[in-house]
Amino acid sequence: MAGMNSLPKSRCGCFIHPGHSPRITLFVNYSGKKKSLIIGIKMRHQTGHSFRLLPEKWIAVTLNFAQKASILFIRFNPNFLTLLGLMAGAAAGFFFALGWPIWAALAIVLCSAFDILDGKVAARTHKTSLYGAMFDSTLDRYSEFFIYLGLAFHFRKSWVLWIPILAFLGSTMVSYTRARAEGLGFECRVGFMQRAERMSLLLTGAVLGTIFRVFNPSMIAVLALIAIVSNVTAIQRTLHVKRQEALRKAEKEN
């Protein structure tokens, strides 16, 4: 392992590969106990896996299916697929505004599908670029805005109007805190309410609301959950960066 030769000598020691444990990834019994403790905590925060509301197996299966399906779209420019995702998101918001949840659900499925496919097609056709990543992230925010705007319009005559507004605020802050953290040189993928979870909840609320004819209560519950947990995720990511910075400073002092 790179960097192990630079560590101080010890009478006995043990190294655990970072991928083997999300909590304690590195422990070495060195004479300099303070330094070994700092190294262990640092590795835990940098390599630990964040908890996801969606099962990791579901995510893996979806991404694997998208990888295989991407061969059907290799003639398309990845940025064009990103634009289709934006159009689908705008359509979802339009259908929510009209009170047509089942059509909104279908549009959300298409929006999510194109959001995955554009990256897979870019990788398969060797068209990945920094601009493409920026273009994708930017249009993702716009597509979510249109969805929440449609829901806000649907509830415009009620105090519930504020729930999709807060949900959009939280969703935007989740993305912003990660982008800002990575711009500062910190890894920041922690958090419960990432984009996949938000889109899945919106889809679930629309479908269940249609099946059981309880669209308003269903969407209010989903939007409230997104509003609360997404803002908690933004705070969680902010504190995560604070911890990482403190660990870097502690390492330099030792």
Image (cartoon, rainbow, N blue to C red):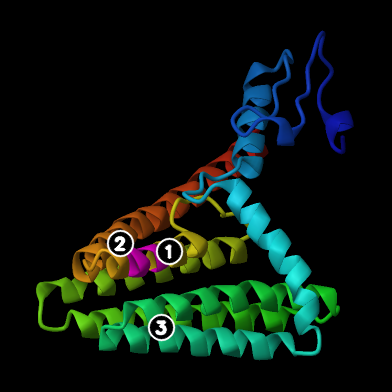
Q: Is residue 245 left or right of residue 206?
A: right
Residue named by callout 1: 198
Residue reaching furthest to the top: 11
Q: Are marks 3 and 1 in contact (CB under 8 Å)?
A: no
Rounded to the nearest angstrom, the CA distance separating label 1 from label 2 is: 9 Å
Q: Is residue 210 above or below residue 16?
A: below
- Residue 213 position, x and y percent, is 23, 68
Instruction: Please determine whether, in this image, residue 181 is positioned above or below residue 39.
Output: below
Decide whether the magenta segment is chiefly helix, strand or loop. Answer: helix
Q: Is residue 102 visible?
A: yes
Q: Secondary structure at mark 2?
A: helix
Of 47 and 113, the residue lying toward us: 113
Q: Quadrant of the C terminus?
A: top right
Residue for point 74% across, 15% down: 30
Q: For mark 3, what is the residue? A: 92
Of helix, strand and loop, which one carries label 1? helix
The label shown at residue 222 is: 2
Under circle 3, the secondary element is helix
Position in image of residue 190 (x %, y %): 52, 50
Name the amino acid type tagged 1. Arg
Quadrant for residue 189, please give it.
bottom right
Residue 177: image location, x then y, percent: 48, 63
Q: Is residue 204 left or right of residue 73?
A: left
* Quadrant (top left/top right/bottom left/bottom right) for the N terminus: top right
Residue segment shown in magenta: 203-208
Disc 3 to disc 1, C-alpha distance: 14 Å
